[in-house]
Amino acid sequence: MPITAPDAAKSAIRKIIHIDMDAFYASVEQRDRPELRGKPVIVGGDPDRRGVVAACSYEARRYGIHSAMAAVTARRRCPGAIFLRPRFEVYRRVSCQIREIFLRYTDLVEPLSLDEAFLDVTRNKPQMGSATRIAQEIKTKIREETRLTASAGVSFNKFLAKVASDFDKPDGITVVTPEMAGDFIDRLPIGRFFGVGRSTEARMHALGIRTGADLRRAEISELLRHFGKAGRFFYAIARGRDNRPVTPERIRKSLGKETTLAEDIDDPAQMMAILQEIARKLEILIQTHEIQARTVVLKVKYADFQTVTRSATLSAPVETADVIMTHIADLLSKTAAGRLKVRLLGITLSNFAGDADAPRCHQQLPLPLFI
């Protein structure tokens, strides 16, 4: 797919890097405990108490283990796996170090989570002309200063940079220039496209769309009919167009996390274990951004793709995972989860008070916070 000259010229103005830490939680554990190196490490819940996998090492991934999998299933697949509880405070401190490295090159850093971020280095502090060289330097400094590895994607927009960062893991770097973008997108499996989850992928396949080349051939009217407003986005990215800016400071209206399960489940206890892990991640965000949220929203997608939400607005702000879960238990009971199988679970916090988007890292020393 050749990108038209106007598109290429416009897109080439920007130099975007996506940095993604390799098996972050598990790698931190292996770094801090040398005896774990080279072994299958699973960070998450207790397999004897219906826990779920939050993250796992590459050694564990060889057994087909992945995040959000039931811990008991992970143990069955890999009886020799080492299960560890998450140490989120440690991961957050390491994230501080990583973001401090990013900020040496640009202030345009958009964190997506503890372990990944976009950087716009079109104009950068060292005044380096090559985004690839910047990405290589960042990877080197991360390794030297944290003893961890990261993978990087370099391109002229966010979509391509994020997809590229996943192509050469671990410790890799993939560059997609405007000249390379057409062939790169054409060969890309549709499931690798931003915004294409399991259900959308299945719908795409039903329409005969399995690769970027197939998506590019689809008429925009067809995409709009089947995917609504998202169809316009899919039409654009199939042609290498993504003008979304890297936005380091955003006014948040809500804050949420969700996970699509590898297998549909109907066990409420397992659902609660998954939601507990999500709530723990939200607790870090609450504390980091000094958020005062008064509304908790539970999202449930059933096996038939029907999605429902249940919410509770509270008299006092939510501050901890335990408080979130107190309300989630009640909200889950108001859905058909358990009677019907579930394929996705999520929690969103909203109804913020005050300046909820001022990250605490701007007020603390010595390092800014990357989350």
Image (cartoon, rainbow, N blue to C red):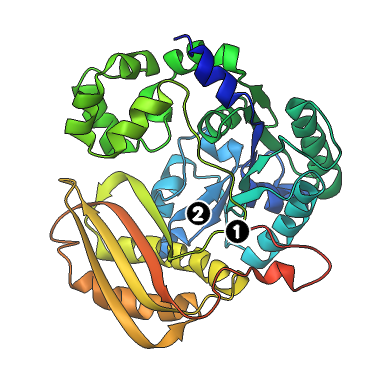
- Residue 47 image offset from top left, x and y in percent: 44, 58
- Which marked residue is nearer to the observer: mark 1 or mark 2? 1
Q: Are marks 1 and 2 in contact (CB under 8 Å)?
A: no
Q: Quadrant of residue 138?
A: top right
Q: Is residue 140 above or below residue 272?
A: above
Task: Judge whether residue 33 can be spotted in this image.
Answer: no
Q: Residue at 55% of width from left, 40% of height from top? A: 60
Q: Nearer the viewer, residue 112 or 251?
A: 251
Q: Amino acid at mark 1?
A: Glu
Circle on res. 137? none
Q: Quadrant of residue 49?
A: bottom left
Q: Is residue 142 left or right of residue 282?
A: right
Per the image, label 2 sits on a secondary structure element best described as: strand
Q: Nearer the viewer, residue 243 or 62?
A: 243
Q: Is residue 250 left or right of residue 101?
A: left
Per the image, label 1 sits on a secondary structure element best described as: loop
- Residue 209 image offset from top left, x and y in percent: 28, 19
Query: In which quadrant is the C terminus drawn?
Result: bottom right
Circle on res. 54? 2
Badge 1 crowding class, 10 Å Cα cut-off, few under 14, some 14 to 19, many 20 or more, is few
Residue reaching furthest bottom? 315
Give the alpha-carbon distance from disc 1 to disc 2, as whole Å. Answer: 27 Å
Badge 2 crowding class, 10 Å Cα cut-off, few under 14, some 14 to 19, many 20 or more, is many
- Residue 310 image offset from top left, x and y in percent: 24, 69
Q: Is residue 150 above or below residue 288?
A: above
Q: Residue at 47% of width from left, 80% of height from top? A: 353
Q: Is residue 226 above or below residue 211?
A: below
Q: Amino acid at mark 2?
A: Ala
